[in-house]
Image (cartoon, rainbow, N blue to C red):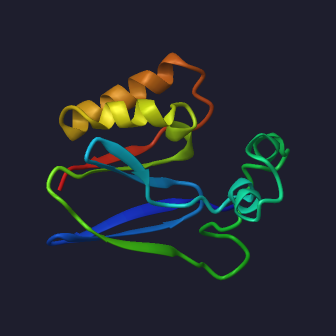
Amino acid sequence: MGSTVVVLLREGNRAACIWVGDSRCYLWRGQRLYQLSRDHSLWQHLMDKQQLSLEQAQAHPDAKALTRAIGGRQPLSLAVLELSIEPGDVFLLCSDGLYQGLSHGELGSALSVGTPLQVVDRLFTNVMRGAARDDLTAVVVQP
């Protein structure tokens, strides 16, 4: 049994995104959505190695299997991305239950307006309109 985590550390105008597993960190900047983290999953591994097409990778029976996790058998290996923060930046840290239930456009649209609480409410409402397939976790940070 393993678990995933995503963390955002900030000091002044610098930030570090740290993660393991398939929880994600997104950045809304200049009316564009960027996925900062890369999933530690079989699906991502297959895509990176170009062994399968997007459709084939998604259809693979073990596509969602984690290749890294907290509590996994191998030593813990965290991924780290450092970046500068700009005025107007908004960060979304979330579990796969949230981003798998929404399109990239829906995530960006929700992040473009409102306070962090309003954004989280909008994201959860949109996911719950569909068939939510997993736990929903989200934190929105407006530095």
Return the x and y of residue 106 as percentages of the image width and height.
43, 30
Image: 110 above or below 79: above
Residue farthest toward the top in the current orientation of the protein: 129
Which quarter of the rendered picture does the C terminus lie within? Answer: bottom left
Q: Is residue 12 something that shows in the picture?
A: yes
Return the x and y of residue 100 as percentages of the image width and height.
57, 37
Q: Is residue 88 left or right of residue 80?
A: left
Number of marks: 0
Residue at horizontal 60 percent and vertical 78 percent from the top: 76
Residue farthest toward the bottom in the current orientation of the protein: 75
Q: Is residue 84 left or right of residue 20?
A: left
135 and 90: which one is in front?
Answer: 90
Residue at horizontal 34 percent and vertical 64 percent from the top: 8
Return the x and y of residue 12 as percentages of the image width and height.
14, 72
Image: 123 above or below 19: above
Residue at horizontal 72 percent and vertical 62 percent from the top: 45
Q: Is residue 126 left or right of residue 32?
A: right
Residue at horizontal 72 percent and vertical 49 percent from the top: 64
Which quarter of the rendered picture does the N terminus lie within? Answer: bottom right
Which image quarter: residue 111?
top left
Q: Is residue 23 left or right of residue 64?
A: left
Q: Is residue 120 something that shows in the picture?
A: no
Return the x and y of residue 120 as percentages of the image width and height.
32, 35
